[in-house]
Amino acid sequence: MKLLKANQLRGTLTVPADKSISHRSIMFGALAEGTTTVRNFLRGEDCLSTLHAFQELGVPIQDDGETITITGQGFGGLKAAEGPIDVGNSGTTIRLMMGILAGQPFTTTLLGDDSLNQRPMNRVMLPLNQMGARLNGSNESEFPPITIQGTRALSPIDYSMPVASAQVKSALIFAALQAEGTSRIVEKEPSRNHTEEMIRQFGGEIMVKGKEIQVTGPQSFIGQEVIVPGDISSAAFFLTAGAVLPNSEITLENVGINPTRTGILDVLEQMGAQISLTAIDQNNQSATITIRSSVLKGIEIQGAIIPRLIDELPIIALLATQAVGQTVIRDAEELKVKETNRIDATAEELTKLGADITPTEDGLIIHGPTPLHGGNVSSRGDHRIGMMLQVAALLTQEDVELEQAEAVAVSYPHFFEDLRQLTGGDVE
Ligand code: S3P
């Protein structure tokens, strides 16, 4: 499709609900006793994969268009699905469900689309097998379809994670909640903590001390009312657009600001962006964020901040193409095993539009500011690459044609409509 162009962006927007929290609201609701209601659930393809997966495991889930209502079955009430469960493009669904299903007394097969079927699963399978479940990839590989032969007799685990990953951590926590005894999980770097927070919200217990987590099982949860805040990872596209497009001012309401997710705000501030937070709600961990265009400078991004902005790195790379000087991103090798290899995809697609960007083993080096020009680019089936390229297209005079634009529906079905609203009709 031909991408939108704009001279400036102005206005107020409410970004869609948080993807990570939406997934987990279905999982916790299904595993709790009693009813859970979820308001502002993200009806993107990934979270709908989680919703349908639990329906296939015998959990009644209704959606009246406003509220999702889940009739919780408890950890003991899931039923074997009739056939393999297709989780589409969703890494969060497959990895977290592996941890849940490891403790169930039946066998399940989880499979996905071409992208998911090439993503590494040993990071979850190996420790879960150590706990006593039997997980196998397709043809003895670590790739989906994954068959999970669960057991009620899981053993606790003492495990130092070799990767910084909230998906691995969460899968192990879900298994540990079903094992008899105390598990100890040590993170490589602190990653998003929505699973830990929801355990507490649903009446369970978890001990967190720095990078160390202790969970004692078995536990049970009580159904809750969940209200999902907006997704800072979706807000990131507008924060970047507002920062780099002249004469722009964008206000984003109800954005989630859990500190394990706000690395993008730190980066914007360090680059010199004009950004302000108002209406800060500490209970819901949300705020209104306003961004105005300004001159930006290149910075170094590495170490502990990486997991706090892992999904934002493609759009941060675009931001860096408009900053004065050099930006270096290091310690981000995890980008290679996302929906696509995001180091290569970001570098190659932005190079097509004239950016000065070099891929490295664990990140990117970007020089700016560079004027971008038109061209033909592809999302490569990756929602975040697609949205990043649309923001890039705002900066070009010539047309940009995007292949596989439909991928954005994975996390942000109305992305192009929302962006159009901010152009106020000022579209070339
Ligand atoms: C997620 C964790 C991250 C992130 C993904 C969502 C989650 O993946 O990239 O979009 O909800 O736990 P990793 O745990 O593989 O880093």
Image (cartoon, rainbow, N blue to C red):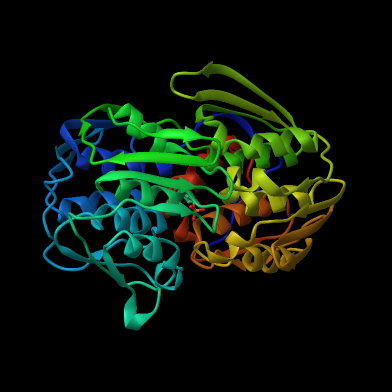
Going by the picture, which residue comes out furthest to the bottom? 139
Determine the image quadrant of residue 366.
bottom right
On screen, residue 171 above or below 69: below
For this view, does 358 lie left or right of residue 394?
Answer: right
The residue located at (73%, 66%) in the rendering is 359
The residue located at (31%, 54%) in the rendering is 99
Q: Position of residue 294 (x, y in %)?
A: 80, 34
Q: Position of residue 107 (x, y in %)?
A: 17, 66
Q: Position of residue 287 (x, y in %)?
A: 54, 23
Q: Position of residue 113 (x, y in %)?
A: 37, 69
Residue 48 in sight here? no
For this view, does 12 lie left or right of residue 372?
Answer: left
For this view, does 237 lie left or right of residue 348?
Answer: left
The residue located at (35%, 72%) in the rendering is 144
On screen, residue 273 above or below 357: above
On screen, residue 287 above or below 72: above
